Amino acid sequence: MKIVAIVNLLLVTLIWGLTFPIQKMVLVDISPFAYNAIRFWIATLLSFFVFGKGNKYGLILGVVLGVSYAAQTWGLTLTTSSKSGFITAFYIVLIPIFSYFIEKEKPNKVQIFSFLIAMIGEYLLSGGVDSINFGDILTFFCAILYALHVVLVTEFSKKSPEKDLLTSQFLMVAVLNSLFGLNQSWKTDVKIFSVALFTAIFATIYALIAQAKYQKVVGSNTSALIFVGEPVFATIFSIILLSERLDMLQIFGVVLTMFALILSIIPEKYFRNFYRHVEK
């Protein structure tokens, strides 16, 4: 079951990485808030017909996720995309804090080491941060909320069927983004709708049900370390689809980040055997 959980969470990470370049290609004529609203309205309707109306836990998750999206989107208008990516990645090291207080889950030594390696890798991949502005602060607030969302998904999925966390969550995100985007461009064409439909089905419905089903199997801390692969996959797909290029430091950042991810999915028993061998 743990292997299945890891594979599904890795697939979610890959899909999330793919959404970066394909959404960037369509977010030229439409407001990010409007796009997010369309994406989550589609997810809400599809989820309602398949999984039902959801419950109060989904509403709570939706508020957290919706405000997180809003903070990131607003912050992105005031800072660079590379800084936004790195600061958002701080959710990786914030998850163990929320996990400790909400779930009483403590990171082990390998996880702590992996978190540090992952943050160094993310820093190099982003190109570094040389100053702080209001947009960066908003983005950090997004990271806090996103970390809280990951832990709450794990916690609530232990109290509620996974399917009941979906529709009401998507509805709240759709409503919040609709309100934030009221006075912005809602221009939509076939290309924008197609990308919104793809992300609604795979990066939203499938991703959230996989999170709810499998995060509780591996724990929030391991899930967080699997999710560090998101910017790596985003970079790979950006190179393929947008012809972006990396310098040597960014390539080293990719290597470090993937090393942290690999450490996170190695069964703990192998590390225990290694420690026993070293002690002998």
Image: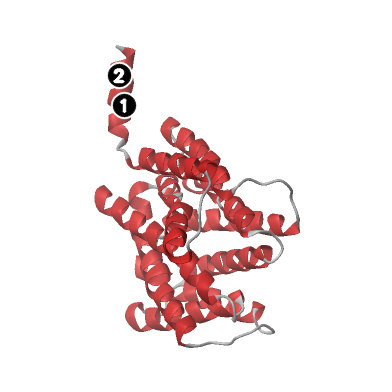
Indicate the position of residue 145 as horizontal and vertical percent values: 58, 58
| Along the line of sight, the residue nearer the viewer: 138 or 63 | 138
Name the residue carrying label 2: 276
Left or right, 12 with respect to 88, comes to left
Q: 49 above or below 256?
A: below
- At label 1, the amino acid type is Arg
- At label 2, the amino acid type is Arg
Question: In percent of the image, x 57 and y 49: which residue is there?
Answer: 126
Indicate the position of residue 248 as horizontal and vertical percent values: 51, 42
Q: Is residue 127 visible?
A: yes
* Mark 1 to mark 2 CA distance (whole Å): 6 Å
Instruction: Determine whether the residue tagged by mark 1 lies in a helix, strand or loop.
Output: helix
Q: 42 above or below 20?
A: below
Question: In percent of the image, x 72 and y 63: which residue is there?
Answer: 78
Left or right, 90 with respect to 167, comes to right
Q: In the rendered image, which quarter contains the C terminus?
A: top left
Indicate the position of residue 27 as horizontal and vertical percent values: 56, 75
Crowd rating for badge 2 (residues with CA inside 10 Å; few <14, some 14–19, many 20+): few
Q: Is residue 93 visible?
A: no
Question: In percent of the image, x 35 and y 55: which residue is there?
Answer: 9
Name the residue carrying label 1: 272
Labels 1 and 2 touching (C-beta < 8 A) = yes
